[in-house]
Image (cartoon, rainbow, N blue to C red):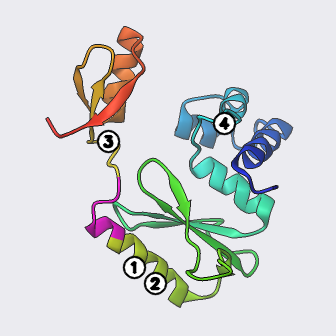
Amino acid sequence: DKLAPSNLREVVKAIILADPTRLAAEIQAESGKDSLAYAEWIAKSDSWGGFIDLHILSEYLGVQISAICIRTLRVESFPNEAKGDARIFVLFDGIHYDCIVTAGSPKVGVFSANDDLTVSKAVAIALELQEQKQFTDTANFTLQCQHCFKLLTGEADAQKHAKETGHFNFQEAPKK
């Protein structure tokens, strides 16, 4: 299955390695890694990509990928202007991306890039999830270190703690 996550990871890796300088600044800004390190990292099954990967996969698949942030309802499209008539929607919950598909059978996940009604429906789904608090605010969520049980606020705080202590196992916890 060419759309299996492991295969898509390999596609992203191969495209980055084919021209490591093309997206080097974007990769550095988003991940803090150089292109070669990112290419190796994204191929791992426990790595989760972001905008860089959406950008690369939109080109590879020949579709516009519109990511909707559940927390902010912001829609970010890759590329910004569709080059064809195909669009995929993904919902971002702060950690993971999930594809929007139609109900029923067969499930359809590719829509017209020119269909504004579908954009409105996709944002409405995100709004419903937002109202249900189905997102993670990675800048402000509370994490607990599972090594020393210290409570930390946000991803940056957890990364700092990991760097200082070598602790790397965190779990989301109720607010401090």
Q: Which region is colored magenta?
A: 129-135
Q: Which residue is mark 3?
A: 139
Asked whether the beta carbons under mark 1 and mark 2 sit within 8 Å of each other, the answer is yes
Give residue 146's position: percent from left, percent from top. 32, 21
* Cα distance between the residues tagged 2 and 4: 32 Å
* Cα distance between the residues tagged 1 and 2: 6 Å
Label located before the other in sequence (4 or 3): 4
Residue at the spot 25% in from the left edge and 28% down from the top edge: 152
Say what secondary structure mark 3 lies in: loop
Label located before the other in sequence (3 or 2): 2
Disc assigned to residue 120: 2
Label located before the other in sequence (4 or 1): 4
Q: Which residue is mark 4?
A: 42
Say what secondary structure mark 1 lies in: helix
73 displayed left or right of 96? left
* Cα distance between the residues tagged 4 and 1: 31 Å
Q: Nearer the viewer, mark 1 or mark 3?
A: 1
Type of amino acid at the residue the image marks with label 2: Ser
Asked whether the beta carbons under mark 4 and mark 1 sit within 8 Å of each other, the answer is no
| Residue 144 seen in render | yes
Type of amino acid at the residue the image marks with label 3: Ala
Q: Quadrant of residue 175?
A: top left
Residue at the spot 56% in from the left edge and 48% down from the top edge: 50
Label located before the other in sequence (1 or 3): 1
